[in-house]
Image (cartoon, grey):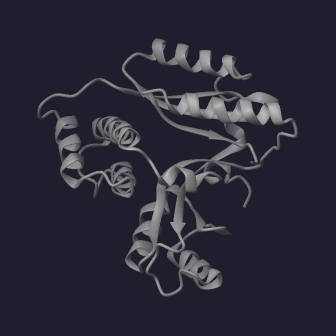
Amino acid sequence: MSGHSKWANIKHRKGKSDEQKGRAFTRIGREIAVIVRQGGPDPNVNYALRDVIVKAKRANMPGDNIAKCIKKASGEGGSEDYESLSYEGYGPGGVAVIIEAMTDNRNRTAGDVRHLLDKHGGNLGSNGCVSYLFDRKGLIVVDREGSSAPGALDEDAAMMEALDAGAEDFKAMEGWYEVITDPSEFYAVSTALESKGYAFLSAEVGMVPKVTVGLADPRHAGQMERMIDAIEGLDDVQGVFHNWDQ
């Protein structure tokens, strides 16, 4: 399956600073707030909440923090009024970019996203301009050496376990496996693999490109890297997805 460039720098991302972890917890808290208001606080009924709890646990967010976020979003103690938004556009060299955000001020967020795209050689597009190039999928990144599963270091064994659990696709990379699922099967697959002893570097539902594009010009590649880092640094941004084949 093509289009896993989101994880090309996963080793670098493993060493997150405390500040980055705190920012991740804040973003997950916002996501929980929006999902609870949309579908309720019971993860057995609200499957989107069930999935984001998996994501929170993989980010090492304490269980007490998760429970407090759900309680607050349920109206006990009040909660901020955030909404979920998606922006589409292009990076340097025509790379397709989707930016998912949760914000309490859509004008501020749109302005910040537009500014950073323009600054780094890209531009903001209209809704639908690139979304047809992506599919929404469950994305599970398995730490090969950090897993205790008997078959973790055996690519064929790990692939069969992932597929038997309900995964759509599997790809072996240097140091990790990429497991792709249908969004509706994300929880079942992640739970099954975890129960067998597989450790995750990341697990979430996000946008996976159908096709990828390369950047032959080193200047464009540098601009793209800086653009992703800058946009991911915005407080309102939940995730940046692209079809750049790094």
Q: Is residue 229 above or below residue 184?
A: above
* 30 relative to 4 in the view: left or right: left
User: Residue 50 lies in what quarter of the image?
Assistant: bottom left
Q: Where does the image place residue 38, in percent across and percent down from the top left?
A: 33, 37
Which residue reaches farthest left? 76
Q: Is residue 165 visible?
A: yes
Of residue 202 and residue 21, the one placed in the foreground of this image is 21
Q: Where does the image place residue 70, in percent across and percent down from the top left?
A: 22, 43
Q: Which residue is at 65% across, 83% downward?
A: 156
Q: Which residue is at 65% across, 53% downward?
A: 8
Q: Is residue 142 above or below residue 153?
A: above
Q: Is residue 174 above or below residue 50?
A: below
* 82 relative to 88 in the view: left or right: left
Q: Which residue is at 62% across, 51% downward?
A: 9
- Identify the image quadrant of the N terminus: bottom right
Q: Is residue 146 above or below residue 90?
A: below
Q: Where does the image place residue 73, in percent across and percent down from the top left?
A: 22, 36
* 216 relative to 43 in the view: left or right: right
